[in-house]
Amino acid sequence: MNSLGSIGLSVYPTAEVELGNISLENGNVNPLNETEVTFNGDISSNNCTGNSGFIEVDAENDQEQVTVIVQISESTDIIVNGDDAECEDFLLGRNVEVQGEIPSINTVDASRIEVD
């Protein structure tokens, strides 16, 4: 089978990835929008001040563990136990569900974070 094109995509344990619309030009696959991801993991570091910065989240399954940098901005929806919160209050080891866009390998620009 001949390939019409290819694309590299970072996928890690527990991730559900939505590639969205793409175009194909001269064998190159071009995303027409950002790649969306939802995944779960445990907070391993917190580098937030107020409601911006980043956290590192360890996503794992029985075969591997990957540390994902989750970038947080003022526009990120942050929910802790059903209430709004700030990312600087995240405790290490807490389980989170992250939704956002993948701008580069093992990095997510978070649109929503929910802490159990």
Image (cartoon, rainbow, N blue to C red):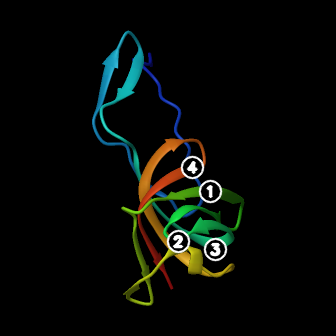
Q: Residue at x 41, y 14 (%)?
A: 27
Q: Which residue, given by chain and number where applicable, does mark 1 sit on?
A: 68
Q: Which residue, given by chain and number where applicable, does mark 4 sit on?
A: 107
Contact check, label 1 and label 4, Cβ < 8 Å? yes
Front residue of 17/79: it is 79
Q: Can you tell which of label 3 and label 2 is closer to the viewer?
A: 2
Q: Is residue 61 visible?
A: no
CA–CA distance between discs 2 and 4? 20 Å
Q: Which mark is residue 50?
A: 2
Of labels 1 and 2, earlier in sequence is 2
Q: Is residue 82 visible?
A: yes
Q: Secondary structure at mark 4?
A: strand
Above or below: residue 50 compared with residue 75: below
Residue 14 is situated, as x and y percent measured from the top left of the image, at 54, 64
Residue 54 is situated, as x and y percent measured from the top left of the image, at 58, 60
Give the residue type at disc 4.
Answer: Thr
Q: Secondary structure at mark 3?
A: strand
Q: Residues within 10 Å of mark 1 (few under 14, many from 20)?
A: many
Contact check, label 1 and label 2, Cβ < 8 Å? no
Q: Which residue, given by chain and number where applicable, does mark 3 sit on?
A: 42
CA–CA distance between discs 3 and 4? 15 Å
Q: Which mark is residue 9?
A: none
CA–CA distance between discs 1 and 3? 10 Å
